[in-house]
Amino acid sequence: MIQDSSQIRREVTELTLLYEISELLDRSFDLRDELVPILRAISKHTGMLRGTISLLNRELNEITICAAHGLSPAQLQRGRYRLGEGVIGKVVQTGLPVIIPSISEEPIFLNRTHARKNIDRERISYICVPIKMDSAIIGALSADRIFGEEISLGEDLRLMAIIASMIARAVRLRQCQQEEYDKLLEENSRLQEALRKKFQPANIIGHSKAIQSVFDLISKVAKGDTTVLIRGESGVGKELVAQSIHYNSDRAAKPFIRVNCAALPEGIIESELFGHEKGAFTGAASERKGRFELAHQGTIFLDEIGDISPQVQIRLLRVLQEREFERVGGNETIKVNVRVIAATNRDLEALMRSEKFRPDLYYRLNVFPVVVPPLRERRTDILELANFFVEKHGRENNKYVRRISTPAIDMLMSYHWPGNVRELENCIERAVLLTNDDVVHGHHLPPTLQTSEASNTIIKGTLEETLARVEREMLIEALKDARGNKAKAARQLGISERLMGLRVNRYDIDPRRYKT
């Protein structure tokens, strides 16, 4: 039997609608985000006037409209029913669908939302189907539309039942996923508790073997007063290691003073470290304590120690040996009880060989070296760090970011991270600011992280095929610029006219197409 055109159009419309709804259900983990778009899709494809999705609260024994299309916020708030009350209450109670050809003739239709005007009620049909999950009724899907003889309410009922079934399956899937997620959280909490029994600084993130070895060194050196030299590339978190040593030591309640030696001009670094007396130099209007005095009984952290001048190295050596110094322009010897932690990304051994760093100072500093690994050597920590930065910068920018997409994770894991943890944090902060759908996608990451898979720029084919494709494109571009003149295009490409003719024939290019 040959179907008539109206039946074919209806089937195509239904298939298009069901496909669109399936896409919506797969789009978000939280189905509440997609209920209104589902109702909009039904309206767009079927001509539905209004639609609602109602859910049963078993604790309160109440049914509430949780999503609606065609209702105002005030009308939506009025959509509350007891079990068995009204059409929706009856459908949820019995689990049976209801078709009402004309709501003006149906006494159990309450019109509680007051969305239908009395003058329109005679022309409105209403369909309500249960949303079943396994054997339980969890809610109802309803819609009303203009009544017409050409409209098959039975076909509408069948379509609504299919959609309700799709919603129920999606709810069940999310429940299973949530149960699995809860199990993973429980297992993760158990593992975290087991790890907490071992030493791990609170301010450093990571569980890789490379960073665990750093934790082990911190636990061994923290309690004493030994001078520590922290080494590692820029951006690996050397200051975090210094803070961890200080705050896990007996000096934790005392000052932790930071000094970036590379950021201080040579003319004032001595004054910054050791202080100065009033009138010691132009601009010294009053006595000033230096960083070593401020760190008394605590810890001083000398970052970028490899950048200090030879003159300052001599004075610093004395402080390390004797724990005493004089302020700039002063004669009084000041004694301090201070622990010294230094850090550098420079090759101090090479600086010693070139006589830019004193060997005696090096050996005073290098009592207990701690080497912080670069991020490329602790790749298993990348995702944990990225998630931490997503949460941190989401909170700072008042944005809720639920997750990092799989392609973005692949990009983070495959990048070599020359800027280490600092670069990772900067990339995540940028991505958090760019995202508009609560997910960090690959295109939110900087171009330096983009891969051919993520940007859909994979070069396919053999080398010979690729070269031929590039050559053909260059020939066409040259002919376009030369408006089809092969001689001019040949000069532009730096080849002979004969070779140009051979190449044009080889690739079956018609120069006449590019003449104006």
Image (cartoon, rainbow, N blue to C red):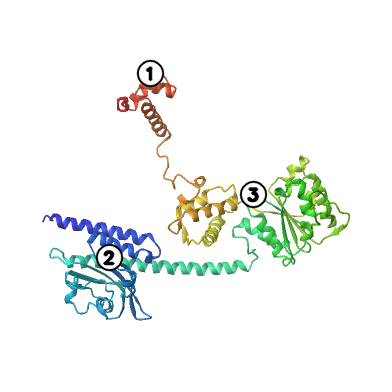
Cα separation, mark 2 vs mark 1, equals 67 Å
The answer to whether marks 3 and 2 mark residues whose Cβ atoms lie closer than 8 Å is no
**Residue 64 image point, x, y percent:** 33, 75
Question: In which quadrant of the rendered view does residue 221 lie?
Answer: bottom right
Q: For the C terminus, give its image quadrant.
A: top left
Nearer the observer, 207 or 235: 235
**Please, what secondary structure does the residue beneath circle 3 have?**
loop
Asked if residue 17 shows in the view, the reply is yes
Residue at 40% in and 37% down: 461
Asked if residue 75 is positioned above or below residue 473 in the image, the reply reads below
CA–CA distance between discs 1 and 3?
Answer: 57 Å
- Mark 1 and mark 2 in contact (Cβ < 8 Å)? no
In the drawing, does residue 159 fall left or right of residue 511? left
Could you classify mark 3 by the number of other residues whose Cα lies within 10 Å: few (under 14), some (14-19), or many (20 or more)? Answer: some
Which tag, 3 or 2, sits closer to the chain's start?
A: 2
Query: In this orientation, which residue lies closer to the viewer: 221 or 203?
Result: 203
For the N terminus, give its image quadrant. bottom left
The vertical placement of 162 against 418, above or below, is: below
Q: What residue does disc 2 label?
A: 163
Name the residue type under label 1: Arg
Marks 2 and 1, the one that precedes in the sequence: 2
Real-space Cα distance between discs 3 and 2? 56 Å
Identity, as a three-letter code, of the amino acid under mark 2 = Ile
**CA neighbours of label 1 inside 10 A, class few (<14), some (14 to 19), many (20+):** few
Residue 74 at x, y = what percent?
33, 72
Task: Decide: few, some or many residues near mark 2? Use Cα within 10 Å; few <14, some 14-19, many ≥20.
Answer: many
Q: Which residue is mark 1?
A: 498
Q: Badge 3 is on which residue?
A: 234
Q: Secondary structure at mark 2?
A: helix
- Of marks 1 and 3, which one's residue comes earlier in the chain? 3
